[in-house]
Image (cartoon, helix red, strand yellow):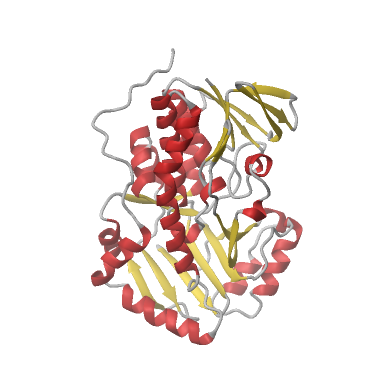
Amino acid sequence: MRILICGGGVAGLTLAYWLRRRGFEPVIVERAPHGRLGGYGIDFFGTGYDVATRMGIIDRLTPHQLPVDSVDFVDESGQATARLTGALLNKVIRGPHLGLMHTTLEGALLDVIQNDVEIRYGETITAVREIGTAIEIDFANDGTERFDLLVGADGIHSVTRDLVFGPETRFARHLGCHLASYPVPDRYDIGRVRAHYTEPGRQAVVYPTGQPGELIALFLFRASRAGSVPRAQRLDLLRATFDGMGWITPSLLADAPASETVFMDTMTQIVMPAWHRGRTALIGDACGCMTMVSAQGVSMAMAGAYVLAETLHAEGDHVRAFRRHQERMHAEVTRRQRNALFFARSLVPGTRAGLIAQSLVSRLVMRNAFAPVLRRQFGVGTILPPQDAAPVDVRED
């Protein structure tokens, strides 16, 4: 069975790996010319770590763990007012975990499939038609081709979803924030911490990437309107929004690269009643984006890819497999979206009173006694059943 995967990020690469192992023929199209560009930090544990372990890539990831020993909430002078220590994080997660750059994980996934899976960079789909027992795809650059199935793994702004299910506005739940990030030189003496500084309506975050002399600057700010910001306008918007902010924020803005290379997006969830239609299915952020505040987006994207490949293999019929995939994943995704929605409301307080309340709560919960509360909030365990034996590799030589 030949399956087109639209999207070469974490979800698409993971799906291609497991489909290939189960005897299918996946083909990936990725609109970026040479794979994904840029990067940001992710918390990697639970189901994602479980899937990566089953793929045998943990040893590739561990040497690249981010050099972060704590998460510090700082005042204008840079002094920590609350701290999530590594020891407390261990109590919360109660299992293996890594802090990674997103591109580190994508690179490891690419390494294990690039010799087995066809990947077409600089390509995307423009039309989809079901014709009998096949699905016909028009490509932006390379004509028309038929496949057995189509899987949209192309993220929150999914082209596949737009073409098959309808426009993004039907499924988007805007959480009232924008985020932006870019690398800056390490000249701030941050150390081995991820530092958060918040003022009403805006927050600046800095952490080391593990690359010598490099930090990531992350900005979050309240914004009532959803919608993308043109690349040429991003830096001007950031500078206007964060004008006059304390701490090291002015220097972070001064160190920004060209506006075109600044990553910026809305903090938006994707909520859909159905993740499949005919011969097309969606996985990852394309059908269930939880936003970065869930700390679960990457893990659940890998979980969805793994579960879809396994159900296709077990069922031998895409209708039953797509239905089982959604039955298995939908409740888990919905719960994490609900938790993220609750957390996002207090992430960047809009008033001074809200900021004081956030500071008091942060000081209270960053204690060992609250580890079970934090654990329930984020749902840190794996959702996959134990694996008694390694999966059989049915790839042909």
Q: Where's residue 350, x and y in %? A: 56, 79
**What's the residue at 42%, 37% (across, down)?**
324
Determine whether 376 is above or below 270 in the image: below
Q: Is residue 191 visible?
A: no
**Residue lying farthest to the bottom in this orientation:** 353
Give residue 36's position: percent from left, percent from top: 59, 42
- Residue at 66 percent across and 77 percent down: it is 243
Lateral position of residue 2 relative to residue 253, left or right: left
Residue 230 vertical position relative to residue 127 in the rendered view, above or below: below
Residue 291 visible in the shown view: yes
Where residue 299 appears, as percent x and y from the top left, is 42, 47
Quarter of the rendering containing residue 112: top left
Q: Residue at x 48, y 65 (%)?
A: 341
259 horizontally vs 98: left or right: right
Image location (x, y in percent) of residue 172: 60, 56
Tell me the residue at 48%/74% (across/down). 346
Quadrant (top left, top right, bottom left, bottom right) of the C terminus: top left
- Decide which of 88, 316 is in the foreground and name it: 316
Q: In front: 362, or 78?
A: 362
Q: Quadrant of residue 2?
A: top right
Query: Is residue 76 or residue 94 the one in the foreground?
Result: 94
Q: How many marks?
A: 0
- Residue 47 versus residue 57 in the image, above or below: below
Q: Is residue 306 left or right of residue 248?
A: left
